[in-house]
Image: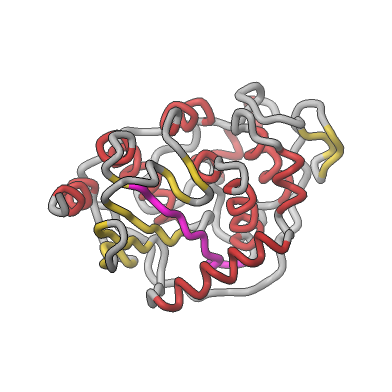
Amino acid sequence: MSGKQARKRRQQAAAPPPVARKGVRRRASPKVLVIAAVVPLVVAGAAVGIALAVGGGSSSASGTVPTRGSLTNALPDADAVQREFAGIPQHGLVLGSPKAPLTMIEYVDLQCPGCRAFETEVLPSIVPEFVRTGKLKIEARPLAFIGPDSIPGRKAAIAAAEQNRAFNFMQIVYANQGTENTGWLNQSFIEHAAASVPKMDVRRLLDSQDSAAVQKTIGRINSQGDADRVSSTPSLFLGKTGSKLRPVLSGVTFDQAKLAAAIRSLG
């Protein structure tokens, strides 16, 4: 993809609420973020997208895809994402030390503009203060609320979790997010996003998306979301590890300062 095409694509992908321009990650702002309102859960087929060519490798929906992910020819912000999570343990869909005394669960949808705002504006401040220091672990629970594009995105995120790189993959997707339900989160985009995560086994991710293990995880997350009465994304639950977590955010206004204060209040 040429630089001109990439710039045009990122301009078309702009979506509310207040978020960083495509290709530019900003530090978390203390301003309140208006999070997307409740959206219905939709079960539909995966969208079929246009081809997106990437560097040499094995055959794929986009023609070729690298066997192993790297920052060479990567999507915008892949290098910033790599720095954000470098050295932090990931175990499946969990980011942070397994022994962290505090836990935060995030129900998200990869094509949700509110999730993008939260992940790119708030999370970059939470991670260094609480996750990198071993105080907090974050568990991602991807949902498919918004529409057809959400389905392949969720499957790919869970497949990335099998390689302990789910947060890298999801953050790259958020940084390059397109307009809801326009077919942008297709297999070509997923391949390019996976290839933008260093050391990701791209072929393994692609082959795992429809596996029984991924479907089992989807079923578990759906059941957990029902039990937690999740009606919008992003929805956060926070508390001491091993205890009942309390809802923090459910489709309402939110800001980094309030979340940080809530975490600190737990000790």
Please name the residue shown 72% across and 52% down the image: 208
Q: Is residue 28 above or below residue 185?
A: above
Residues rendered magenta in the picture = 137-147
Please name the residue shown 37% across and 53% down the image: 17
Q: Nearer the viewer, residue 255 or 201?
A: 201
- Please state the horizontal and vertical placement of residue 170, each as a whole percent of the image: 52, 46
For this view, does 136 lie left or right of residue 7?
left
Q: Is residue 45 above or below residue 205?
A: below
* Quadrant that contains the N terminus: top right
Q: Nearer the viewer, residue 113 or 101?
A: 101
Applied colour scheme: secondary structure
- Please state the horizontal and vertical placement of residue 164, each as a whole percent of the image: 55, 42
Q: Nearer the viewer, residue 150 or 214?
A: 214
Please name the residue shown 40% across and 73% down the image: 230
- Please state the horizontal and vertical placement of residue 29, each as a whole percent of the image: 25, 40
Q: Is residue 73 above or below residue 14?
A: above
**Number of on-image labels:** 0
Q: Quadrant of residue 180?
A: bottom right
Please name the residue shown 35% across and 47% down the image: 137
Queried whether the magenta region covers residue 33, the answer comes back as no
- Please state the horizontal and vertical placement of residue 222, each as a whole percent of the image: 52, 72
Q: Is residue 246 above or below residue 209?
A: below
